[in-house]
Amino acid sequence: MIIVPEKEIAGLIGRKDAFEAVENVFAAMASGAAYNFPVIREAIGHADALYGFKSGFDRSSLSLGLKSGGYWPGNMAKGLTNHQSTVFLFDADTGQAKAVVGGNLLTALRTAAASAVSIKHLARKDAKVLGMIGAGHQSAFQMRAAVEQRDFDKVIGWNLHPEMLVRLEETANELGLPYESVDLDRLGAEADVIISITSSFEPILKAAQVTPGTHVACMGTDTKGKQEVETALVGQAKLFTDEIAQSATIGECQHAVAAGIVSEDNIIEIGAVINATHPGRTSDEDITLFDGTGVGLQDLAVASAAVELAIQKGVAINVDF
Ligand code: NAD
């Protein structure tokens, strides 16, 4: 069995590898070659922790396994990241344990890759202004991956907690792009692509604030009750997601589905657009919305890539098991 420790991940897998892995697995999901198993997520009644498993199997790449982990709010005080995860891969032919891979950085890379895949396939080709809602840990990863998909010339941002906006400014500067903090009216009016990556339980972005032609990637809503945009915006947009079942129950579309504004039939798997079995955006006036709920198959895809790279670069730790 191979171990790839968390500390090795940054030196192994980059945005390009993560993008390819995630785009391929979304395509495999839409063609029926890959599927996610039901998600388990429990408050364990200890350390205020939320713990769970995301798992699945991709027959096209033979990636089989699970991501185990969750959220430990007291970790920060111990000098640890609150979100903790580890990916376990199994040999699809024998069921034997194949690899244990640190999953913290991989989670950020695969989540950023998902919105980047949505921008590649759904945003207008002439998109110039990137709007960021949210300035937490994930936001910098999101911005770096997004700007590789279009010729953006400016980043604008909003966050509930303004003291965190410095992260967006620093990341834009690192990418050589001008940055401005704006209110939500300006963000909606000026951005061609909007990424929301927050822990919000209330709609932040309103339908009236978003202009025709915008692509919105809602990446923060991954749990029942969370919400980042008004249901009216979901009702107006052409809807795409990683997995329809998650979108309708724990993703951004959950509220519009519960309210009867849209149904699961209105939500398209992004993999169908990648596979060219769905046209995606058909007009420069369309508002497209990608509901990135986060699926276990994304984790398995990037972890499998990390294992291959670790073997190639000689940093995989082999253990008898
Ligand atoms: P973080 O704790 O570093 O940052 C949280 C962000 O949300 C900050 O911008 C903060 O200002 C904002 N925020 C907090 N409470 C809010 C509220 N009540 N209303 C509006 N904004 C609020 O978190 P992070 O690591 O950047 O993750 C952000 C979100 O992304 C989390 O909700 C996390 O669960 C989600 N996430 C989703 C996926 C996925 O695959 N879809 C993957 C990883 C993380």
Image (cartoon, rainbow, N blue to C red):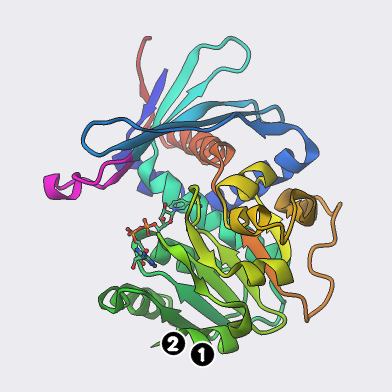
Q: Residue at x 65, y 81 (%)?
A: 127
Q: Secondary structure at mark 1?
A: helix
Q: Is 219 above or below relative to 68?
A: below
Q: Is 164 above or below relative to 260?
A: below
Task: Report x, y in % for residue 42.
Answer: 39, 32
Task: Report x, y in % for residue 120.
Answer: 67, 65
Q: Which residue is mark 1?
A: 186
Judge: label 2 CB < 8 Å from ligand 1.
Answer: no
Residue that lies at the very extreme toward the front in this rendered image: 259
Q: Residue at x 31, y 30 (%)?
A: 44
Q: Residue at x 66, y 66 (%)?
A: 234
* Magenta residues, start to end: 71-85
Cβ atoms under marks 1 and 2 closer than 8 Å: yes
The image quarter in which residue 318 lies: top left
Q: Residues within 10 Å of mark 2 (few under 14, many from 20)?
A: few
Q: Is residue 147 visible?
A: no
User: Magenta includes 186?
Assistant: no
User: Magenta includes 73?
Assistant: yes
Q: CA distance from mark 1 to mark 2?
A: 6 Å
Q: Secondary structure at mark 2?
A: loop
Image mark for residue 183 = 2
- Front residue of 182 and 87: 182
Q: Is 110 above or below relative to 112?
A: above
